[in-house]
Image (cartoon, rainbow, N blue to C red):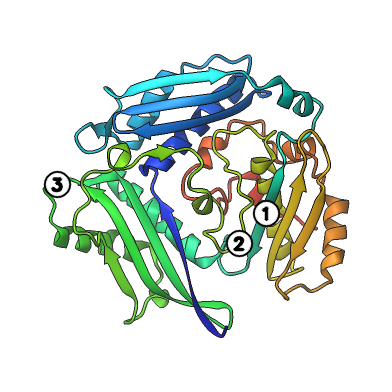
């Protein structure tokens, strides 16, 4: 198509699903800080005034999970049981067991912690090799949190969502068609004030002038009110924002969630590695777009398959790129973990505003291939 529109969304750290993701990743980091070989698969559920943490942990570390949960809820800014959640009074329930010995049989010898398919993607559309719509959606969501915590817009509350629609011409991003922001706020604030402040302090601070024109439509809190939010407004669950976490739907997703899982789970670690490879294929000039898929079997070290699509932009045959990948990179779980240093407690940095495009993460560095 010569012209088409594509939309992606992001959410703030106070969105109930992201609250749960962040708790799960903070628990993972807490165990890895004490024992880098910890095996962790933890999920969090939040509803009304209750938070449930459940899963499997095998580790020499000892973590006070309840205190950690309350600290995370406080850090995000939830302190009002009448509108969202209160870190001081919420109920915290914990149900943690050890990793299944049936899974450990394969993982302990360096095999994949699960079967599955994983994808990685990169393109030249933005400075961090991410698709345009998710790039701007994340920037808007991060800015919503920054203006709240810094006091620039002090009446905002933690929950919020953003959405950006980009118009493409000849397969290249041309302009932004519309911007949607829904943000939780204190009850006493009127909608006109909210719209003015969000436009001036969030949208204009993030979106370049040349991406907006007279036809761009902006929607802010279209229902007119967003006071009740967080787990009081909607339940939260770890792993329910997988498209927000990856490429905003612009590239495929294998189905596995990331947060709360240590790197032996290839649906996390292999997806990070494929992003690294795809980004470097593009950055090294082999293609303008690149999507890679691999598949694994539980307990087996080597991937079962490797597939690549450069969408007609490759400078060399795709089969040559696959050969290059096989020669250059170790795609066994152990090889990925070692190369990307995935036993370090870095996961709480990944949780919010996308797992990709953050330059300080090991799978985002650019190397010469």
* Whether residue 130 is situated above or below residue 209 in the rendered picture: above
- Image coordinates of residue 142 in percent, x first then y, are 40, 51
Q: 10 Å neighbourhood of mark 1: few (<14), some, or many (≥20)?
A: many
Please tell me which of labels 1 and 2 falls first in the chain. 1
Q: Residue at x 38, y 74 (%)?
A: 209
Q: CA distance from mark 2 to mark 3?
A: 39 Å
Which residue corresponds to mark 1?
A: 119
Name the secondary structure under disc 1: strand
Which residue corresponds to mark 3?
A: 187
For the C terminus, the image quarter is: bottom right
Q: Which mark is residue 251?
A: 2
Judge from the rendering whether residue 91 lies leftward or rightward of residue 305; answer left or right.
Answer: left
Judge from the rendering whether residue 203 lies leftward or rightward of residue 224; answer left or right.
Answer: right
Q: Residue at x 60, y 25 (%)?
A: 32
* Whether residue 119 is situated above or below residue 55 in the rendered picture: below
Q: Residue furthest bottom?
A: 2
Q: Residue at x 43, y 42 (%)?
A: 18
Q: Residue at x 35, y 31 (%)?
A: 73
Name the secondary structure under disc 2: loop
For the N terminus, the image quarter is: bottom right
Evaluate if marks 1 and 2 touch, with contact meaning CB atoms under 8 Å apart: yes
Q: Residue furthest front?
A: 102
Number of numbered discs visible in the structure rendering: 3
Q: 10 Å neighbourhood of mark 2: few (<14), some, or many (≥20)?
A: some
- Image coordinates of residue 303 in percent, x first then y, are 81, 46
Please tell me which of labels 1 and 3 falls first in the chain. 1
- Image coordinates of residue 136 in percent, x first then y, are 45, 62
Which quadrant of the view contains residue 203? bottom left
């Amino acid at each position: 198509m010569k012209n088409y529109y594509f939309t992606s969304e992001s959410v703030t750290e106070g969105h109930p699903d992201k609250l749960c993701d962040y708790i799960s990743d903070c628990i993972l980091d807490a165990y890895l800080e004490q024992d880098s070989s910890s095996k962790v698969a933890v999920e969090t559920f939040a509803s009304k005034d209750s938070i449930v943490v459940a899963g499997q942990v095998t580790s020499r570390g000892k973590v006070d999970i309840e205190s950690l949960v309350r600290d995370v809820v406080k850090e995000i800014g939830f302190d009002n049981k009448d509108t969202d959640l209160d870190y001081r009074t919420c109920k915290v329930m914990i149900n943690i067991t050890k990793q299944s010995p049936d899974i450990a049989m394969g993982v302990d010898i360096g095999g994949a912690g699960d079967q599955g398919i994983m994808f990685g993607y990169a393109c030249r559309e933005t400075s961090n090799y991410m698709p345009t719509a998710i790039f701007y959606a994340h920037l808007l969501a991060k800015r919503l949190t920054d203006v709240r915590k810094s006091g620039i817009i002090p009446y905002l509350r933690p929950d919020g969502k953003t959405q950006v629609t980009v118009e493409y011409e000849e397969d290249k991003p041309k302009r932004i068609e519309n911007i949607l922001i829904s943000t939780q706020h204190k009850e006493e604030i009127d909608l006109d004030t909210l719209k003015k402040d969000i436009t001036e302090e969030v949208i204009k601070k993030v979106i370049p002038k040349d991406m907006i024109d007279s036809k761009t439509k902006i929607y802010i809190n279209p229902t007119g009110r967003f006071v009740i939010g967080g787990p009081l407004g909607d339940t939260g669950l770890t792993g329910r924002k997988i498209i927000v976490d990856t490429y905003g739907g612009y590239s495929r997703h294998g189905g596995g969630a990331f947060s709360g899982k240590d790197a032996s789970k290839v649906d996390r670690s292999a997806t990070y590695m494929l992003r690294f490879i795809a980004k470097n294929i593009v950055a090294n000039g082999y293609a303008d777009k690149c999507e890679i898929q691999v598949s694994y079997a539980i307990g087996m070290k080597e991937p079962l398959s490797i597939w690549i699509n450069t969408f007609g932009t490759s400078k060399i045959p795709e089969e040559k790129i696959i050969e290059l990948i096989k020669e250059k990179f170790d795609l066994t779980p152990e090889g990925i973990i070692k190369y990307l240093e995935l036993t370090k407690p870095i996961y709480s940095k990944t949780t919010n505003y996308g797992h990709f495009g953050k330059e300080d993460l090991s799978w985002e560095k650019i190397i010469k291939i």
